[in-house]
Image (cartoon, rainbow, N blue to C red):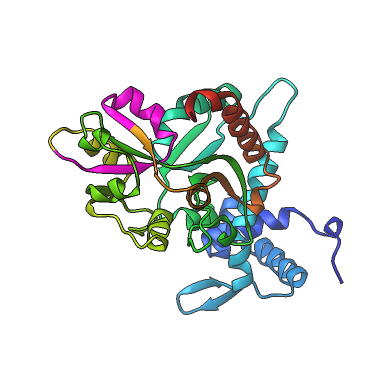
Amino acid sequence: MKKSLARLDLNLLITLQLLLQELSVTKTAKKLNVTPSTVSKSLSKLREWFDDPLFIKTPHGFSPTSLAISMEQELADWLQVSSQILAKRGDEIPNGVRFNLAMESPLLLTMFNQLTQQIFQQYPDAKVKVHNWDYDSIEAIIRGDVDIGFTGRESHPRSKESIKLLPYFINYEVLFTDLPLVYLHKDHPALKEDWNIDIFVKYPQINITWEKSDTWALDEVLIEMGLSRNIELTMATFEQSLFMTAQPGHNMITTAPQYCQHYCRNIHPDLVCLPIPVDKALQDKLMIPFTMIWHKRNNQNPKIKWLRDAIKALYRDLNNTYLR
């Protein structure tokens, strides 16, 4: 039978979180300014409520059970939200809010100034930490190290980066869809030829490693056509590939999201863009849904809900500027 929350002393959950942190009845008692006996009685009540020992004595000290470990992040989230609620007053905004973001770059560079301005207007004493999106970012969201991730996924049916393959406990919302372009120097010889798929694969290319993979949907599409790219240089980020493409003295080209046009206009004005020369059906397989990603446990977290709404509003306002 499901137990009513009204029957549980919520102070016990604070004790449980401290026990998970300290792995010691004595240290937890000191933190709570109570006796170890009081903590032991609280632990007995928690064990009865959850029908689980929660902690087991080992030669090396207290060891949490699997159930206790599984509740650690939820307890931290609950206490954070509780603290925010209790700190609220009609004339105050909570201080010390922390945001941990994982964002693809250079998209980060094109919009982050506006986003941080909004964050600090809403939460003047906020602390913001930004991670570059990489192969470990989904795991970081699952662990709770990242509140929201923002990155491109893929539309190709065989892609390992498809939205459909995200874990069931991950929520997402597509903010815009991008069709990648080919970037090349304004003096590149390809600009004097009729642009088609044969010319595209004729010239050496700069590739990037994406989430530990050196291939992406474009390579799958080319395989369907019996073609492949001649990759001479592989780099870590779009910024690096665009920087190298903008340098004179070579004939390498690169492929990057369409939104990078805005970045290039400011940083690499010598780069020009061309479409990937494939038909509409194949272009659809190359579409990249740029996606906001968060853990389901944060669905009702007030700071995360506010941040999601702020990002959505920002992209509605900046769509004509940054995504063309």
Whether the magenta-drawn stretch holds residue 252 is answered as: yes
Which percent across, then down, holds residue 40? 66, 67
Which percent across, then down, holds residue 233? 21, 50
Whether the magenta-drawn stretch holds residue 249 is answered as: no
Residue 194, quarter of picture:
top left
Q: Along the horizontal axis of the image, is 286 left or right of 89?
A: left
Residue 243's place in the image compared with 209, above or below, is: above
**Residue drawn at the location 72% of the way across and 66% of the way down:** 46
Residue 233's place in the image compared with 3, above or below, is: above
Q: Along the horizontal axis of the image, is 20 left or right of 78?
A: left
Which percent across, then down, holds residue 57? 55, 77
* Magenta stretch bounds: 250-272
Looking at the rendered image, the quarter that the N terminus falls into is: bottom right
Which percent across, then down, holds residue 180? 43, 42
316 or 278: nearer the viewer: 278
The residue lying furthest to the left in this view is: 249
Report if residue 105 is visible in the image. yes
Residue 242's place in the image compared with 140, above or below, is: above
**Residue drawn at the location 36% of the way across and 36% of the way down:** 274
173 or 34: nearer the viewer: 173
